[in-house]
Amino acid sequence: MKKILFLFLILIFQNIAFSQNIVVEQVRLELSSRKEAKILIPKSEIKDINVLAKTISLDYPKGEFWLGYVNEKQYKNFLKLSLKHSLYTESYTKALTMATNLSQMSSWDRYPTYLVYDSLMRRFATTYPEICKLDTIGFSVDNRLILALKISSNPHSDIDKPKFFYTSSMHGDEITGYVLMLRLADWLLSNYGIDQRATNIINNTQVFINPLANPDGTYAYGNNSVSYATRYNANAVDLNRNFPSVPNGGHSDGENWQKETLAFMAYADSNEFSISANLHGGAEVLNYPFDTYTSNSQSHADANWFVSVCQQFIDSISPLAPSTFFRDVTHSGYTNGGDWYVVDGSRQDYQTYFKHSREITFEVSSDKSLSTTQLNNYWNYLKGGLISYIETCQKGLQGYVRDSLTNEPVRAKIFINSHDAFNSEVYSKASTGYYYRPIQSGIYSITYSADSYYPKTIYNVNIASNSMNNQDVILAKIQDNLRKTEDNKFLINIYPNPAKDLLRVSLPENSNIFSYSIFNMLGIEIMKGRINDMNTDISIKDLNKGVYMIILGGKSIKFIKE
Ligand SMILES: [Zn+2]
């Protein structure tokens, strides 16, 4: 009996090993023809989802399985985890009808060929030159164009209005958003001066729309088809794992920054977007920062703002949508990214953390490459949400930061006290001093600070809901004549440092310094007083332990309170 059982177990074991060997061969075959393969891993096999997410490009749960993408390198590392898996192949029974000329796009029920896409983008700019400009963000690995439309009441200059950025399909096989973005651009442009909402958006916001972020992935099988599109770019790299990782900016995916990634980073450098979204597919959910952390380990300072704009989006979905729409991941229709699953190197976190923007990932259709017969329906379901998200740029706080004497613009840090954290602060534009800060309504204390200027805190700034609030600020420059005296740091001395109860300030003769201010590291002034002597003792025993700045004349000196 025992012998039989033993034999039986050996047979099962060999059978599994044998079938896994076949799977490995199948995956390798797929990799050799497509450079990427989709694999299904039973949920029961996965001990730590975040280890798996760091090894492969984890996609979404599908029933009892997780779907993941691998390139050759990722697959090699994945095999070391010894997880049972199978190759996932999609059968293309649905219609992915292509528009092979511009007029076939007019009913919005086809995917454009690459050339039709290119012509359509150019036609927007030539049909509406007063409100639309075509930008080239850069080129893909295979030298396809990465394009963006800039839609604004003055598209040829950078005006002082919030900048909003939509981009879609950085995963080349997630193409519902591709057509939605083209259609949104068409709706905005053709309704300017006709529809109040479109007109308000264009008059009050600089809107940038990049419908296709990974053209090599979408057109992996040639410019005339989107069937068999790949998630990855032409180097088999997942672009949504390829951005500098938070917080150290490293290459968490072990890949060089791809041409597409570098192009987007440069575009974000030259256009400081305030609010953005990147559109994906495979699920129906809005995913807000951070992807890198669960909400328990590091939530965004504006988490309540994110929740409220997500709710606004969900409330704007058409009642015609099926009741299951945007319910496949969470009941609310939105989630913190890391609470769903942790991902490093996403563009959402890059924009939000490094660029001080606010970016949400929109997963717009459970079916990644929606059948063309469904494209009109999805536009009707999502149009309201897509428009309402742009309209969030019409709410919050804006203003100018300028020099008190010259009225010149100042690039300043705008920090909401007892609120901002982990890079959530915003900056004013160097060219004009204009800033925009999206934020939930409330009463805030805000500190404006810049190099060579005294920081300034404005208390009780009342930000009303559903409107744009204005707060202009002038900053006083630390005076040069005082600075010259103090540049010789041997002349000004503070000691001991660190200090416990008393801080002695020792000044040279005729220093012309008669007062001091002490700021905490948030730039808030917490003490000030007179200096009457060459040696003045300041009592600091009531200060909390920490690092402070003392400003003497024009000079700021750091000290530590023990
Ligand atoms: Zn995606």
Image (cartoon, rainbow, N blue to C red):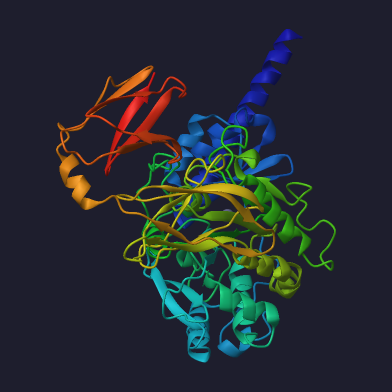
**Residue 77 place in picture, x, y as percent:** 46, 35
**Residue 225 place in picture, x, y as percent:** 55, 73
Of 480 and 402, nearer the camera is: 480
85 in relation to 110, above or below: above
Q: With 532 as the anchor, is 267 left or right in this view?
A: right
- Residue 182 in which image quadrant: bottom right
279 in relation to 378, above or below: above
Q: With 508 as the anchor, is 460 left or right in this view?
A: right
Q: Quadrant of the N terminus?
A: top right
Of 358 and 110, nearer the camera is: 358
Q: Which residue: 27% across, 44% down?
A: 554
Count of labels in the image: 0
Q: Which residue: 40% across, 62% down?
A: 429
**Residue 478 place in picture, x, y as percent:** 29, 50
Q: With 558 as the anchor, is 242 left or right in this view?
A: right
Q: Could one spot residue 284 in this view of the protein?
A: no
Of 124 and 51, nearer the camera is: 124
Q: Residue furthest top?
A: 2
Q: Residue furthest front?
A: 532
547 in relation to 552, above or below: above
Of 391 and 75, nearer the camera is: 391
20 in relation to 282, above or below: above
Q: Quadrant of the C terminus?
A: top left
Q: Quadrant of ligand 1?
A: bottom right
Q: Could one spot residue 332 in this view of the protein?
A: yes
**Residue 277 place in picture, x, y as percent:** 57, 60
Q: Which residue: 63% across, 57% down?
A: 362
